[in-house]
Image (spheres, helix red, strand yellow):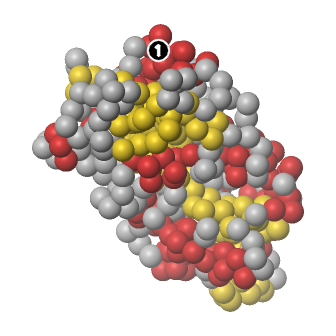
Amino acid sequence: MKFLFDLDGTVTLQETLPIISEHFGCTEQIAELTARTVAGNVPFIESFIRRVNILGNYSVTEISDLLAQVSLYPKVAKFINEHKEDCVIVTGNLTCWCEGLFKKIGCQCYGSEAELEGDQVIKIKSILRKEQIVNQYKALGETVVFIGDGNNDLEAMRHANISIAAGLTHNPAQSLLSICDYVIFDENALVRQMGQLCGDFGDSKSVVISCAGIGSRLGLGLTKALVQINGSSLISWQLKLFKDVEDLRIVIGFQGSEIIEEVRKFRDDVIFCYNHRYFETKTGASYYLGARHANRETLEWDGDLLVHPDDVKMLLETPGEFICYGDITSEDTVCVHVNEKGDVLNFSREGGIMNGQVLLAWTRSI
């Protein structure tokens, strides 16, 4: 498995070009271009050419020394250092400007190339297309995980096997949310997810809350997670139930951005998992997407389910695999058939003396 990282704002605590512009006193021009580029309002190549034209007359050595001092996300940097052979930096920035920073990070790095005259950039020779590096490693048989935040990461994410939109420095570009597998806003959660992808599973249980549906039976045009109950959203009540769960994963689809915004009012360390086919699929597909890279044991929780906190505590503490079921309360019911020991034999739409409605399931990650 190879982890390919965007550089600015993903591995570094700050965007690098604004640092250069502030040092040389041309902040306003660069800041505006950078903001519009990250948001996807200016094509990256056009923006990059314009920014290099502004900064190209300054000393390459001075810029490299300046960027070598840029702070890194410490836990991301530690992960890269511990997995040097499997981590790669891919940035549209100029390699000559980032030479000192690349040495500091310590893994394989790719960037755009420039022609130099003396200590100045006189010409851009090539602008890195990140998806080419993704395809290069895929052609070698690698499973590629791409982590980025900007609009110029879109094609690399589209080509990667697994894509993570990282919102550590700023919110990911909106375009990424239409194709990414995960959205993560917290450094600890990002490193935890990367560790899980490496097979480093924690001892704790993951909880997967499925909130991707359109809430069609309610007829409100509102996903159930955002329905107000006693003055608070349903998802906020669920967050209280699972406040002590470290690896909390919320599967989103319909109104995904609104759910992200609501959840982040309460905690930032949630891993958001996208079900882009939410209109065609049901809870089982959402659970698969949420559990496939989680810890070994996961609790599947339906997004419209509220249970007494004491019962939730009991479920989290119960070892092994189990199914929870209750009395039939609606016409649209999935039933379980159980034997005299309470073992589940099968599921069906047919009722019976020992049947109940499936509420949630405890199972191993898929």
Residue picked out by circle 1: 311
Residue 132 seen in this snapshot: yes
On-image quarter of the N terminus = bottom right
Q: Secondary structure at mark 1?
A: helix
Q: In the rendered view, would you say 189 is above or below 253?
A: above
Which residue is drawn at the image coordinates 62% and 59% (left, top)? Answer: 147
Task: Give left or right: position of 92 versus 312.
Answer: right
Residue 192, image quadrant? top right
Task: Give left or right: position of 85 versus 121.
Answer: right
Q: Nearer the viewer, residue 39 or 348?
A: 348
Q: Position of residue 219 (x, y in %)?
A: 13, 43
Q: Amino acid at mark 1?
A: Asp
Which residue is drawn at the image coordinates 74% and 87% (left, top)? Answer: 115
Q: Position of residue 140 (x, y in %)?
A: 78, 80
Q: Nearer the viewer, residue 67 or 145?
A: 145
Q: Nearer the viewer, residue 154 or 322?
A: 322
